[in-house]
Image: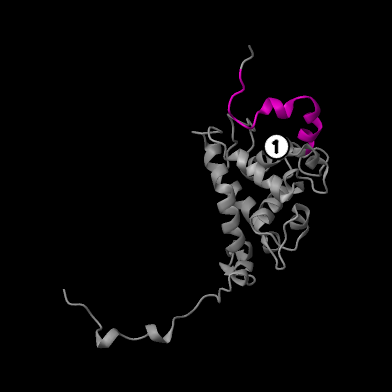
Amino acid sequence: MGIPEEPLTIRRRVVLGGAAALPLLLAFGGGTGEAAGLPPIKDAFDGLVAFLVPGRDRFSVQQGRTSPSDGGVAAGAGPSLEYVYDQAIPYPLVGRPFDLNLPGAAAVAAILNLVAVEVAPAAALGPFASAFANLSFADKVEVFRRLEEPGLADGTPVRFILDTLPTLAAFVAYSEAPVFDRATNRLTAVPLGWQLSAYQGIGEGWNEFQGYYRGIDRVPD
């Protein structure tokens, strides 16, 4: 009688074994032009923001889910999201279930690429350096289904990070972050999120809110 498999969907020994060796190498940036030892970060994050806010870009086209308007990639959300994770996680992530020993955006990209290879091994050979970016929209959904599996990384910092991915990616895509100049504290362009949501921008107040209500200009003690 064999030993039953643990209930977790993602198992590193499955990814590391046999025919998965080549996809794993590619998922971690082998021959992609990324810095040595790092996964393909940029493509992974562009694939992520295209998943949350599709547009007309090539990452959205690759996943088979597009929009007639620009989306997260055109907004520049990918690099901004990288910056957020690099600032929020300056230390390497170690321990179960991935044992990556990578910090920040590199750890997030590695997780996405690892699970992408498990979902669809052929994605490692697509047009992008990142296996996650090469997935179809449905396969990206499956990646997140597995990452949300109960018991996976529970009680670890990895669990918290995984839970932030979809929400934070969408938030950054609609925010001012991609066009905010931190040196001058000014916007360098109209944020794409403003255009997509028909937001008219910062207002200096409205006539109906000027003056005092019925002449009352103070409240007695």
Q: Residue at x 79, y 40 (%)?
A: 124
- Is residue 114 at least partly visible in the picture? yes
Q: Is residue 142 left or right of residue 25?
A: left
In front of the other: 39 or 144: 144
The residue segment tinted magenta is 4-26
Determine crowd level at label 1: few under 14, some 14-19, many 20+ residues with C-alpha closer than 10 A. Answer: many
Residue 28 vertical placement versus 3 (above, below): below
- Is residue 106 at least partly visible in the picture? no
Q: Which quadrant holds the N terminus?
A: top right
Q: What is the x, y in percent for residue 56?
A: 75, 63
Residue found at the very far top of the displayed protein: 1
Q: Residue at x 59, y 31 (%)?
A: 94
Q: What is the x, y in percent for residue 20?
A: 78, 30
What's the residue type where badge 1 is placed?
Leu
Which SS does the magenta portion mostly show?
A: helix
Q: Residue at x 17, y 77 (%)?
A: 220
Asked which quadrant contains residue 26, the reply is top right
Residue 199 vertical placement versus 215 (above, below): above
Is 10 part of what is drawn in magenta? Answer: yes
Residue 140 vertical placement versus 205 (above, below): above
- Element type at marker 1? helix
Q: Residue at x 59, y 35 (%)?
A: 93
Asked which quadrant contains residue 189, the reply is bottom right
In front of the other: 124 or 187: 124
Q: How many marks?
A: 1
Q: What is the x, y in percent for residue 106?
A: 66, 42
Is 77 part of what is drawn in magenta? Answer: no
Q: What is the x, y in percent for residue 147?
A: 60, 39
Q: Name the residue tied to disc 1.
A: 114
Residue found at the very far front of the displayed protein: 1
Q: Which quadrant holds the C terminus?
A: bottom left
Q: Is residue 135 left or right of residue 5?
A: right
